[in-house]
Image: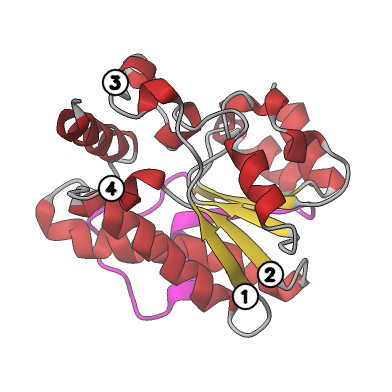
Amino acid sequence: MQQKPALIFLALAIVGAAAWFFTQTDSQGAALQTREVAARGLAEELGRSQFGSKILVMSNPYTQRPGIAKAIAGMEQAGLAGLRAGLGTKATVGAVAFPELRPEAQDNPAALLSDVETTTPLSFLVAPDAFDKLIKQHGDCAVVVSLIGLPVELNRCEAWNASASPKFALLLPDFRGIADAPAIIKAVKSGKLLAFVLPKPGAPASDAPLAKDWKAEFEKRFVLVTAENVEQVFEKSPELF
């Protein structure tokens, strides 16, 4: 078993893929705050629109392993804290679930990530049916919020392809599993993809301190995409898709 090297590699992959969060040690506090702000903005939209009273959160399964890197654990905790703060009393986190990993991702994620640059490495590491299993276990949750992206083999995800519930919301997603920008727009307009948060072009540097007004910081750093603005965001910043 090579669990420790595998976890180290995953930590480096996540930090490398989202380097703007962790450019230097002194900025980690601000980086975690930034992650929390991003999740809070997403959750507030879900609470405001009252899409469902219970939310199923897809979280990083590596955080359940002993000896996990503090950077990974901290990022996940910040995301969850932001979700809960944003939902307030309008909705609740029904469950935090940890999708099953592909067998080869258990001990050697490097084999799946060696040629990949992504904001959501777990998209390539979770089993294709992992989301479906958890969604069936938590059938009372009408909305799935993923902090780890969508399975890259999204065509094999029954919950995504079904016209009925659940609906999805995503934090800083990698859309590689979706065919193209028109397919993303269609998913949003149809209501299958309720909302997602993307980094805003020209946002403040990763080590820039955050002001106390979290909403102002969200507006400076992120773009919230919904059915109301998805076409406009694509026209203005197609590179985000």
Residue, x 13% and y 49% (percent of image)?
A: 24
Give the SS element for disc 1: strand
Residue, x 28% and y 49% (percent of image)?
A: 72
Left or right of 114, for residue 133: right
> Would you name the residue on which mark 2 appears?
54
Front of the two marks 3 and 4 = 4
Q: Earlier in the sequence, mark 1 or mark 2?
A: 2
Image location of residue 127, percent across then percent down: 53, 29
Q: How is this picture coloured? A: secondary structure
Left or right of 11, for residue 187: right
The answer to whether 115 is drawn above or below residue 196 in the figure is above
Residue, x 71% and y 49% (percent of image)?
A: 136
> Would you name the residue on which mark 1 appears?
92
Q: Quadrant of residue 93?
A: bottom right
Contact, mark 1 vs mark 2 (Cβ under 8 Å): yes
Which class describes the residues within 10 Å of circle 4: few (<14), some (14-19), or many (20+)?
A: few
Marks 1 and 3 sit apart, C-alpha to C-alpha, by: 35 Å
Give the SS element for disc 2: strand
Say which mark, if any, is on residue 65: 4
Q: Earlier in the sequence, mark 4 or mark 1?
A: 4
Which class describes the residues within 10 Å of circle 3: few (<14), some (14-19), or many (20+)?
A: some
